Image (cartoon, grey):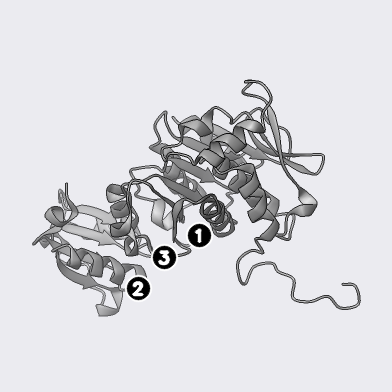
Amino acid sequence: MNKKLRFKNKKIAVIGAGVEGLLSAKWLKEHGALITVLDQKDGKDYLKNLDKYDLIVRSPGVKLSTIREAFRQGSKVEITSQTKLFFDFCPCPIIGVTGTKGKGTTASLIYEMLKKEGYNAYLGGNIGQPPLEFLDKLSTQAIVVLELSSFQLQDLTKSPHIAVFLMTTSEHLDYHEDINEYVSAKRNLLRFQTASDFAILNKDYPASRESDTEIKGKVFWVSREGIAEGCFVRGKKIIVRGAEVAHKNFLVPHSQTARHANSENFVGSSRTKDIEIIGIKDILLPGAHNLENVRAAVMAAFLAGVSKQNIVSVLKTFKGLEHRLELVREVGGV
């Protein structure tokens, strides 16, 4: 359904008056909705009478369970979020990245690689722009990279074309009931994929490794050690194995440069042929932990049809995000 027709004259409550909540309210109002913003600063009864609305839009910091408990039993009012709205209306492929640590760096690397290749790429979620800010600008030829937290994923019902599931350990247990709920929210990134989608999992961490049982998409692994299909380290070099067929199925047409450059890096037609991407010493991004992010970004970019040349170019120049590990200056050789 057309966005403007779906929301026109609908009574919609946006829960949470933070940045994302206010942006959701603005976007929905522009598409014809009758908006009320509700926030806990308004008092303890701010969620009273939710049943009078046609739609509830939850901000990430508001627990889904809190809203559900506020409804009368049997209420059929739909609850959504900015992330769900974006997935519902986005006309182009999405690369989604989640994990406990490293998702901002990984998403940024993928975005830079896509831009280098010449894609009409956008970066959003917890980093870059809030996705509703650019939703109405997107065409079918664009591609979006989203960094997604468990807060944003907990009620997602669609998965991205390429889902990147990084190192995941216990976190946000003040928000989630337990580690199982936290990991389950993360796995919504993977849960709704189809056979034409791709999932990239970190084999070195149980929560990621054990997620493959829920995936219908094609799985590629990243690891410190050799794997059957995916991206790993061998002899201090980043290697991609077994992806030469898969990357041809990406939903956005590849540039002729990428199609030609990537095919030249393989000898024969074996799905297990290796391609050397870059030596570790040539990667500008500091820190051994960042090699995990690099492997995931390389795998995602390769599946999206980015050429080896452009992947390498970004890895040689990408310094990392501000306020992360970075060289300030060298003193006395240290």
- Is there any visible trace of residue 16 in the rendered image? no
Q: Which residue is at the front of the view, 176 or 53?
A: 53
Give the side of residue 28 with respect to residue 257, left or right: left
Mark 2 or 3: in front is 3
The C terminus, quarter of image? bottom right
Q: What x and y, as percent, mark residue 6?
A: 14, 53
Q: What x and y, as percent, mark residue 95?
A: 46, 47
Give the side of residue 36 with respect to residue 153, left or right: left
Mark 1 or 2: in front is 2
Q: Circle 1: is it few (<14), some (14-19), or many (20+) Cα within 10 Å?
A: few
Give the alpha-carbon distance from disc 1 to disc 2, as whole Å.
19 Å
Q: Residue furthest right?
A: 332
Q: Which residue is at the front of the view, 261 or 132?
A: 261
N-term-proximal mark, 1 vs 2: 2
Label 2 with label 3: CB-CB less than 8 Å: no
Please name the residue shown 40% across and 36% down the image. Answer: 193
Residue 18's tag is: 2
Label 1 with label 2: CB-CB less than 8 Å: no
Q: What x and y, as percent, mark residue 307?
A: 59, 42
Q: Which residue is at the front of the view, 74 or 314?
A: 314
Q: Circle 3: is it few (<14), some (14-19), or many (20+) Cα within 10 Å?
A: few
Q: Amino acid at mark 2?
A: Gly
Q: How many marks?
A: 3
Residue 129's tag is: 3
Q: Circle 2: is it few (<14), some (14-19), or many (20+) Cα within 10 Å?
A: few
Q: Amino acid at mark 3?
A: Gln
Q: What x and y, as percent, mark residue 72?
A: 16, 56
Residue 172's tag is: 1
The image quadrant that residue 208 belongs to is: top right
